[in-house]
Amino acid sequence: MRRRAFRMVYEAQLGHPGGDFSAADILATLYFGVLRHDPRNPSDPRRDRFIMSKGHATGVLYTALAAAGFYPEEWLDTYMQAGSRLNGHPNRNYLPGVETNTGPLGHGLPVAVGIAIAGQLDGADFRTFVLTGDGELQEGSNWEAAMTAGHRRLFRLTLIVDRNRLQQGAGTEETNALEPLDDKFRAFGWHVERVDGHDHAALLRVLGGAVGDRVKPLCVIADTIKGKGVSFMENQAAWHHGVPNREQFEQAMKELV
């Protein structure tokens, strides 16, 4: 997924590969081990819902959706081209498998809370998952949504925080500190788990476990590395939306095995 997403960014000379790479293992685990979905019937009312709140990380999202069978992988060749369905931010009107349009940060969790409330009112058993960036949590709309989710005990809702500690231009803690992030969510009425966001087995254990007798929404803080897998990209804020030249592309493709 990282190799395909990086090729898309290179060919388009547009994208956000640092965040693509930090989120890749989370998306792989969700689409191929956790989510209840049917690419042949993407509007199945029984499906689990996934909201990609960090909507700028479309390289890896589109790769995951294509690999899961929602549309032909050939569509990936059109990434960000004029007239393409694969915009810089996901659009549910263009692509099957996209639950809602995202891009403006701070919108995904509120939408996911609304979906989870609808499921609660209907007595439905689908789960709602949402992936946010960590810098995105500086948006106040997330905390209004978190408070509502805790109050309503939306136990079928799971928030995953891509905790790579970098946002556009700088680290999160020097921009507007988030820690202690786990305590903050607990104070809002959430159950919190912290996990290595690149450990598929650990992610599967936390995300794929049965809801069981849980009575609170679940927040999974996934500790990740921005630019994971490429030596010159890892933990570098410049690769939030950096694009590679030919030499960098070739080096990255050798390292991404």
Image (spheres, helix red, strand yellow):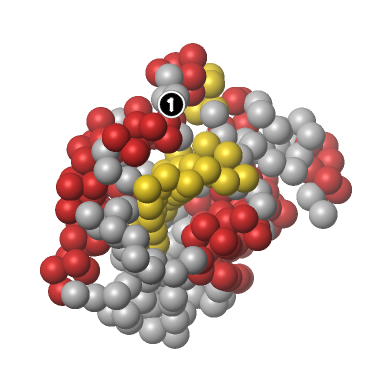
Q: Residue at x 48, y 23 (%)?
A: 172
In the figure, 209 relative to 218: above or below? below
Q: Nearer the viewer, residue 17 or 28?
A: 28
Q: Amino acid at mark 1?
A: Pro
* Residue occupying image coordinates x 29% and y 75%: 125
Q: Position of residue 57 (x, y in %)?
A: 50, 46
Observer-nearest of 86 and 26: 26
Residue most extreme to the bottom: 40
- Judge the density around disc 1: few (<14), some (14-19), many (≥20) Cα neighbours within 10 Å: few
- Is residue 54 in view? no
Q: In what quadrant of the picture does the C terminus appear?
A: bottom right
Q: Position of residue 75 (x, y in %)?
A: 55, 68
* Image quadrant assignment for residue 64: bottom right
Query: Quadrant of residue 18 in the image?
Result: top right
Label 1, secondary structure: give it: loop
Left or right of 159: which side holds 63? right
Q: Residue furthest top?
A: 174
Q: Which residue is mark 1?
A: 180
Of 216 and 23, the residue lying toward us: 216
Q: Position of residue 231 (x, y in %)?
A: 79, 34
Q: Residue at x 17, y 47 (%)?
A: 151
Task: Decide if residue 128 is on the left or right side of residue 6.
Answer: left
Q: Position of residue 190 (x, y in %)?
A: 32, 45
